[in-house]
Image (tube, rainbow, N blue to C red):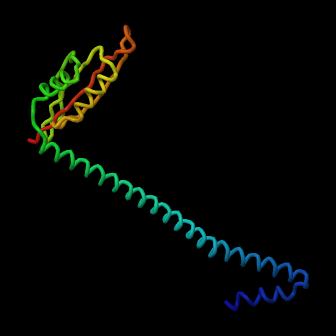
């Protein structure tokens, strides 16, 4: 190593003082550049990457906590619904809906059975109900009665249309499901 430095040192001593200052300044700048790009820059980049990974991990943790809360909430609602199904009154869905419609004073235009997805734990009975020429208040009362009955019923796929001949009356179609444990 000394063998390579001796000629450089000799060449540096042969320079005039102004050239020595210029070569020294370039050497110092070159040394600073090597330290900056070889040590400080990579460390700073690594620090930035670590901060980004920490922020990403915190976002993922926050999302996991939110998903866990949602899961717990949905699971508790499912448990409550399953308990209602197990302890609820089992009855004929058609009879229940017909009784509730007479209670509210609404004639049912049609009750059509619908296919339901098979389940390992529950048997679902599904009917599509059509109401013609009913007021909004009547429809709301009937839907409320369905939701409030002791039998576990679920209203799905609600469609409401105003009648072309009387805008105060509605044609309402919806699907009601009942559930029984298997």
Q: Nearer the viewer, residue 63 or 35?
A: 63
Quarter of the image holding residue 2? Answer: bottom right
Q: Quadrant of residue 158?
A: top left
Give residue 129's position: percent from left, percent from top: 22, 22
Using the rendered view, name the quadrant where residue 91 is placed: top left
Q: Position of residue 22 (x, y in %)?
A: 85, 78
Q: Please, is residue 81 above or below residue 169 in the view?
A: below
Query: Can residue 43 be seen by looking at this rendering?
Result: yes
Give 138 or 7, whichever is nearer the viewer: 138
**In front: 181, or 19?**
181
Q: Is residue 91 above or below residue 47?
A: above
Determine if residue 120 is in view: no
- The residue at the far top in this view is 165
Residue 99 pos. (x, y %): 15, 25
Which of the pair 55/49 is nearer the observer?
A: 55
Horizontal arrangement in the rendering, residue 180 relative to residue 19 (left or right): left
Identify the residue at image location x=38%, y=10%.
164
Q: Is residue 98 left or right of residue 174?
A: left
């Amino acid at each position: 190593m000394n063998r390579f430095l001796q000629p450089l040192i000799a060449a540096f001593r042969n320079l005039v003082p102004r050239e020595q200052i210029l070569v020294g300044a370039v050497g110092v700048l070159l040394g600073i550049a090597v330290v900056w790009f070889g040590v400080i820059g990579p460390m700073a980049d690594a620090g930035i990457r670590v901060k980004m990974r920490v922020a990403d991990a915190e976002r993922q943790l926050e999302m996991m906590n939110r998903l866990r809360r949602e899961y717990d909430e949905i699971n508790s609602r499912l448990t409550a619904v399953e308990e209602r199904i197990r302890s609820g009154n089992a009855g004929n869905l058609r009879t229940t809906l017909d009784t509730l419609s007479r209670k509210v004073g609404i004639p049912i235009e049609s009750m059509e059975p619908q296919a339901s997805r098979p389940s390992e734990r529950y048997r679902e009975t599904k009917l599509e109900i059509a109401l013609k020429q009913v007021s909004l208040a009547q429809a709301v009362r009937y839907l409320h009665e369905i939701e409030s009955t002791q039998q576990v019923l679920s209203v799905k796929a609600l469609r409401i249309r105003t009648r072309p001949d009387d805008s105060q009356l509605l044609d309402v179609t919806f699907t009601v499901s009942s559930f029984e444990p298997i």
